[in-house]
Amino acid sequence: MIEIWGFALFAYVASATPGPNNVLLTAVGASVGIRRGLPALAGIAGGFAMMIFVISIGVGQTIVLADSGFQLGMRLVGLAVLVWLAWKIATAPVTPEGAMPADEESIPKREVGFFGAALFQWVNPKAWIICASAIAAYLNVEQAVLPQAAMLAITFIAAAILGCLPWLAIGTLVGRYLRGARARAFNYVMAALLIVSVVPMML
């Protein structure tokens, strides 16, 4: 049976350490706050958990990991998704200098929602590395794979939410003090960091 507590610790550390997902969540938190950023957090946790489940039961191993053509297609789609997410971060509306709270509420926000964040997991190189490492270390192929895959996925959802939530909160705190040009510069930096953190591993 899976050493579930060991895997939970592994999943928490993997989720809490800096990486593309947490760059994304920091930017989302700064732009829309914790409450409106929760769909992105759920998308990261859910998309990652689905990856673990699919690859654990063997579908990913036979289709994704073994087919070089499929891998190339995933890289191209990944670059497109990455550019789209970076664009949404860089062009997110910012609060003008001197704006009052009532004015801030009226500013439309461009959000990264559940599906965008979930899709990003399938083209996030760090996610693939963590997923492969977790399966190699914690999946017992001599026992029924399906319940193990489900347990890994469920555990990862809980661990990822706990590990990634502080990054969303940090982004929210930072966003409260950023206005005008500083907020726009922060968005540009976050968009650039997202690309820099992923592209070298994809290429």
Image (cartoon, rainbow, N blue to C red):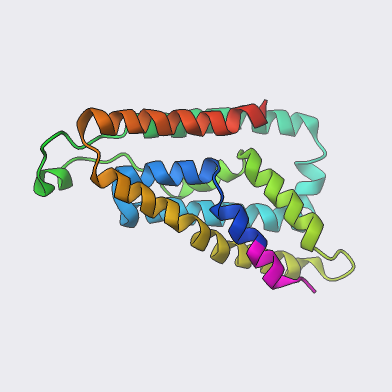
> Which quadrant holds the C terminus?
top right
The reply to whether residue 95 is in sight is: yes
Indicate the position of residue 114 as horizontal and vertical percent values. 45, 50
Indicate the position of residue 162 as horizontal and vertical percent values. 50, 63
**Above or below for 182 versus 56:** above
Residue shown at the point (66%, 52%) measured from the top left: 51
Magenta stretch contains residue 169: no
Q: Is residue 194 left or right of residue 39?
A: right
Residue shown at the point (77%, 51%) measured from the top left: 59
Q: Is residue 110 left or right of residue 55?
A: left
* Total marks placed: 0
> Which quadrant holds the N terminus?
bottom right
The reply to whether residue 88 is in sight is: no
Dominant secondary-structure state across the stretch colored magenta: helix
Q: Report the magenta residues as a range.
A: 1-9
**Above or below for 49 versus 32:** below
Residue shown at the point (46%, 42%) measured from the top left: 24
Residue shown at the point (28%, 44%) measured from the top left: 175
**Above or below for 163 versus 40:** below
Q: Is residue 129 left or right of residue 120?
A: right
Quadrant housing residue 140? bottom right
Quadrant housing residue 46? bottom right
Indicate the position of residue 118 as horizontal and vertical percent values. 53, 48
The residue closer to the viewer here, 193 or 58, is 193
* Residue occupying the far bottom of the picture: 1
Indicate the position of residue 16 as horizontal and vertical percent values. 54, 54
